[in-house]
Amino acid sequence: MQMPKFLRKLFRNILDLRADIIKHILFVSIHLTSNQRKIEKGKNLLIVRLDGIGDYILFRNFIEEIRKNFPQYHITLLCRGMYKDLAQALDSQYIDEFIWFDRMFFFGNFRCLYATIKQIRKKHYELVFSPRYTRRKHDVGDFFVKMSSATEKIGISGISIDYAQKFAKHHYKYYTRIVEVEEKPLFEFYRNKEFFEKAFHKPLSISNPHIDVSSVSYSERLPDNFVILFPGASAAFRQWPTDKFATLATYIQTRYDLWILIAGSKADYFLAEKIIHHLKKVDTVINLCGKTTLIEFAYVLSKAKLLISNETSAPHIAAAVHTPTICISNGNHLGRFNPYPAQIFKEHITIYPPQIARSKATFDDLVSQYHDGSSLDINSISPADIIPSIDLLLTKHTDYTSIS
């Protein structure tokens, strides 16, 4: 039963008031307790990047460009603790200090918010970069920028998800400079590139996201030839049914001489077990859910013949380690996070519901319709829609052929 409109409005107003009260208390508390004599001065730079794992993958290669442009600066990255091991393993050579923060909204732990702001204010930052394109009403990214007391604060002219654009522009006042980017839809990697090229006033040579896993240590023995299934997702509308994943696994086992590895977080363990429950041949199946760190997963993924995944972080990591990928998507954020441009990675196929896959509309028209979200049912995608792409990607390489 849907909540009445007046109750939804009342609930939103209560949340707004609570967020405003928390902001005010934090602002006053920090100013009352700050000791200016203890602030560390010097060439300090802060990057604020508080979004998901996939967003980080599409952004992180630009950290090297920041280091090249500011070689003498002490660089701090404020980002999510959920990908701590990945960020430390890949980017410690460019980042001097990390600040981990996982509570994205003002309704989380007040003490954690306060401690993070105090940590930010320990240094006098000459410069802050905040390139996050999407703004939400009660997230804390812009507020951290405001509280940083940096000399120069550079942000991006982004989009607003859950409140009016005119209110989003109020947050622009927290910055000394807003980089104006194109309003037309753009794949997220290219959006990051556009931001930094305009911020640095010069073109950048970086052409695609990439992850170097050559130095990753992974002690477990892997099969010689395997496909990875990734059945988890951050939201139910992104999650393809486990019985359909099982149908694909059976097809791969029957036609190809490949192991099946099922990967994901600890929370995905039982999704993997559901898939395995549907399989007759289980001696060449491994449930890896919850058994690898993110950087270890990137290494394992780099060795796979193919990834079949819901639209989540895994396809972005796969593209960065150049593993052929089939991404199953309901069309959410079409043109922004999917499909992958061929210029970035050609062996990355996205499978959509029939309303998109069989549409006679132009790609630009489809992007206009689904760029900001999709309500299409991912369950309408059948295994038969995916099998031709499996065959295409598995038989494309000369070192691997079908056994049927």
Image: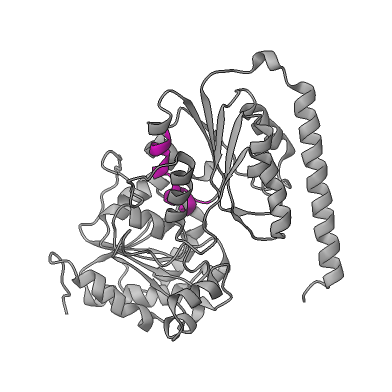
> At 36% from the left edge and 74% from the top edge, which residue is drawn?
279
174 vs 27, nearest the viewer: 174
Q: Give the side of residue 30 with respect to residue 386, left or right.
A: right
Is residue 82 placed above or below 348 in the rendered structure?
A: above
One can see residue 354 in this view = yes
One can see residue 85 in this view = no
Horizontal and vertical percent position of residue 317: 38, 54
Q: Give the side of residue 258 with respect to residue 50, left or right.
A: left
> At 80% from the left edge and 30% from the top edge, which residue is drawn?
28
Q: Is residue 58 covered in magenta?
A: yes
What type of secondary structure mainly makes up the magenta span? Answer: helix
In this view, the residue farthest toward the top is 37
Is residue 124 placed above or below 38 in the rendered structure?
A: below
Task: Classify residue 224 by image quadrant.
Answer: bottom left
For the N terminus, the image quarter is bottom right
Q: Is residue 370 covered in magenta?
A: no
Task: Classify residue 349 by image quadrant.
Answer: bottom left
> At 25% from the left edge and 77% from the top edge, which residue is drawn?
254
234 vs 10, nearest the viewer: 10
Is residue 176 placed above or below 272 in the rendered structure?
A: above
Task: Classify residue 92 by image quadrant.
Answer: top left
**Magenta-highlighted residues:** 52-66
24 vs 236, nearest the viewer: 24
Horizontal and vertical percent position of residue 187: 44, 60
Colour mode of the rendering = one colour
> At 26% from the left edge and 53% from the top edge, which residue is drawn?
222
170 vs 130, nearest the viewer: 170
Q: Give the side of residue 351 with respect to residue 260, left or right.
A: right
